[in-house]
Amino acid sequence: LQALPLRGRVIAQCSANSGLAQLLQTWLPRWGLEYKRLETDDSLLGHSLDVLISDCPDCLMGLRPSIGTPILLVTAYGSFLEPELARRLSPLRQLARPLSRNQLYQALKHVLEHTAIAPSSASDTTGEQRNTRVLLVEDNPVNQLVAKGLLQ
């Protein structure tokens, strides 16, 4: 089953050897998106883009005043930005690693179909937790401890 093509120009601001860069290089052209990767210290001035994807929250703080483009921030394992910081970077959508192809596709589709992303829910932009119940079954004691740590 093929995903419907998307239209837009995407710039990713991440290091060349990051897993994110490799995933984006593979997936985005297949979805019909123009893709360009910049190093985290490269300037975005002079580049035309519809969405910026970054894995570097610190890099975004200096950029936000100069670009109004929606941002997809890929964070490490659910370590979302504090609510106030997320508001300052708005329009912002945060995705947590590990990142699935479908998550990325749906987020890009949403961003590209809406000229500006208003925060759709607290958990999308701020990382606030909802009352979610999770059943995790793991027979290995070490994995049980790791899973508990990730879920707390």
Image (tube, helix red, strand yellow):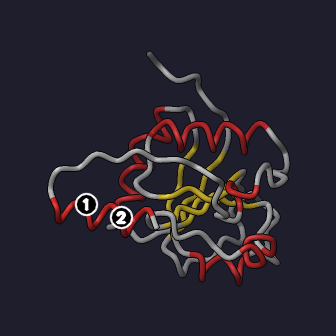
Decide if residue 9 is on the left or right side of residue 90.
Answer: left
Residue 41 x, y percent position in the rendering: 54, 81
Q: Residues within 10 Å of mark 2 (few under 14, many from 20)?
A: few
Check disc 2 and report the residue beneath it.
148
Q: Which mark is residue 31?
A: none
Instruction: Name the residue nearer the viewer: 66 or 45.
Output: 66
* In the displayed structure image, the side of residue 43 where residue 13 appears, left or right: left
Q: CA distance from mark 1 to mark 2?
A: 6 Å
10 Å neighbourhood of mark 1: few (<14), some, or many (≥20)? some
Q: Position of residue 116 (x, y in %)?
A: 84, 50
The residue type indicated by label 2 comes to Lys
Give the camera-side residue of 128 and 65.
128
Q: Quadrant of residue 54?
A: bottom right
Q: Quadrant of the N terminus?
A: top left
Q: Residue at x 61, y 37 (%)?
A: 106
**Horizontal relation, residue 73 to residue 126: left or right:** left
Relative to 5, 88 lies left or right: right
Residue at 59% from the left image edge and 76% from the top image edge? 57
Residue found 25% across the figure and 60% down from its top: 144
Q: What element does badge 2 sit on?
A: helix
Please state which amino acid type lies under the numbered disc 1.
Gln
The answer to the question of whether label 1 and label 2 lie on touching residues, with beta carbons closer than 8 A, is yes
Numbered circle sitting on residue 144: 1
Q: Position of residue 127 (x, y in %)?
A: 64, 64
In depth, the one of 46 and 124 nearer the eye is 124
